[in-house]
Image: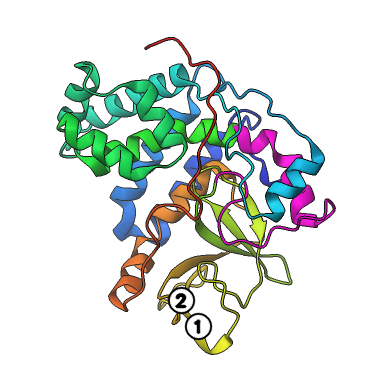
């Protein structure tokens, strides 16, 4: 991650202004997505309004070990003593649920999530740890046992831990920058995130050269990728790679692979999107997801790497 990418709430006094400006621009460009844009922007405002920054403890940084880890294709957080700030995530989760419950047309399932969370059917330490490592199958199992909607619980838990993931990505930014530049001998060439193992939510074509960068939807990390290469299966066969362009859509296109039948939405962005706004760009381009799915392409389930962490001392119970 280069310095120009790290525009996060903890260091960006204009975060909410940037959010409102982007939401307004997206709403004007795609009025049919206005309800989804407004809802996601409302939830993002809650993540920007926290009373304190999430706690992210320093991780061991042995340069040789880091180089070996990345050279082996293993994300930087894997099996590290990561502290998951459960108190921070729990407070944000509560504010997100309250924001949804306060809507005139609250999403179906909010009451069941509230009941599960307040009755003790969901253990917060387990919920936020599983959300942090992005074990979506485990989150779905927890929701089913608690009688909550799996999709809604997963979305809320992921939003609650997103500032935690971004905090660790910020901490690891110098290592990421070295890996991107190849100065440590371990240039990253994988399609999944080198910090947390998630698949990219978007690609960005930047600058006059239209260099391709991938953006992690979980922690906001950015890393460069070849223009003619499938993010998901790695093929460089140009006969298998093509792009779908929506009518009257100049900023976005969909890159598809006829080998693995996966797709990636790609944004023309002279400047990189602040990491906390990547998810909003993703939500506001759902019409391209629908177009890709209609043509037989899909996003992969889960993550590109099954992350596990060695949790440090847990926060006190909520």
**Residue name at image x 67 percent, y 41 percent:** 6
Label 1 sits on residue:
242
On the image, the x and y values in percent for residue 279 come to 46, 48
Q: Is residue 152 left or right of residue 195?
A: left
Q: Quadrant of the C terminus?
A: top left
Q: Is residue 270 magenta?
A: no
Residue 309: image location, x then y, percent = 53, 34
**Colour mode of the rendering:** rainbow
State left or right for residue 1 relative to residue 88: right
Q: Is residue 140 above or below residue 184?
A: above
For this orientation, the residue located farthest to the top is 316
Q: Earlier in the sequence, mark 2 or mark 1?
A: 1
Q: Residues within 10 Å of mark 2 (few under 14, many from 20)?
A: many
- Give SS at disc 2: strand
Q: Which image quadrant is residue 92 in?
A: top left
Q: Callout 1: 10 Å neighbours few (<14), some, many (20+)? A: some
Say whether residue 63 is left or right of residue 7: right
Which residue is situated farthest in the bottom direction here?
239
Q: Residue at x 35, y 44 (%)?
A: 136
**Dot 1: element:** strand
Disc 2 to disc 1: CB gap under 8 Å: yes
The CA distance from mark 2 to mark 1 is 6 Å
* Stretch of the chain drawn in magenta: 168-196
The label shown at residue 256 is 2
- The residue closer to the viewer here, 284 or 263, is 263
Instruction: Count the labels in the image.
Output: 2
User: How far across and down, in percent of the image, does residue 163 sit?
Assistant: 52, 32
Asked whether the viewer can see residue 152, the reply is yes
Which residue: 48% across, 14% down? Answer: 315
């Amino acid at each position: 991650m280069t310095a120009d990418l790290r525009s996060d709430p903890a260091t960006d006094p204009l975060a909410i202004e940037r959010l409102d400006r982007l939401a307004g621009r997206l709403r004007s460009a795609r009025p049919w997505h206005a309800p989804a844009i407004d809802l996601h922007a409302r939830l993002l405002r809650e993540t920007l309004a926290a009373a304190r920054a999430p706690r992210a403890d320093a991780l061991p940084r042995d340069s040789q070990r880091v180089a070996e880890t990345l050279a082996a294709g293993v994300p930087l957080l894997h099996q590290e003593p990561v502290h998951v700030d459960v108190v921070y995530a729990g407070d944000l989760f509560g504010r997100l649920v309250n924001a949804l419950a306060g809507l005139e047309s609250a999403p179906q399932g909010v009451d069941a999530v509230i009941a599960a969370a307040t009755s003790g059917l969901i253990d917060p330490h387990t919920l936020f740890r599983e959300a942090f490592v992005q074990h979506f199958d485990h989150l779905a199992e927890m929701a089913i046992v608690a009688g909550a909607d799996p999709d809604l619980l997963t979305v809320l838990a992921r939003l609650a831990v997103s500032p935690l993931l971004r905090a660790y990505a910020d901490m690891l930014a110098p290592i990421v920058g070295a890996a991107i530049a190849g100065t440590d001998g371990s240039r990253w060439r994988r399609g999944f995130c080198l910090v947390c193992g998630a698949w990219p939510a978007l690609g960005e074509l930047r600058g006059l050269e239209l260099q391709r960068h991938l953006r992690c939807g979980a922690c906001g990390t950015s890393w460069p990728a070849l223009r003619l290469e499938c993010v998901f299966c790695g093929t460089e066969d140009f006969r298998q790679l093509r792009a779908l362009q929506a009518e009257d859509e100049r900023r976005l296109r969909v890159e598809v692979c006829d080998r693995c039948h996966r797709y990636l939405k790609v944004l023309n962005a002279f400047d990189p999107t602040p990491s906390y706004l990547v998810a909003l760009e993703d939500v506001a381009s759902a019409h391209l997801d629908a177009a890709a799915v209609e043509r037989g392409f899909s996003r992969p389930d889960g993550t590109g790497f099954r992350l596990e962490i060695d949790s440090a001392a847990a926060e006190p119970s909520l």
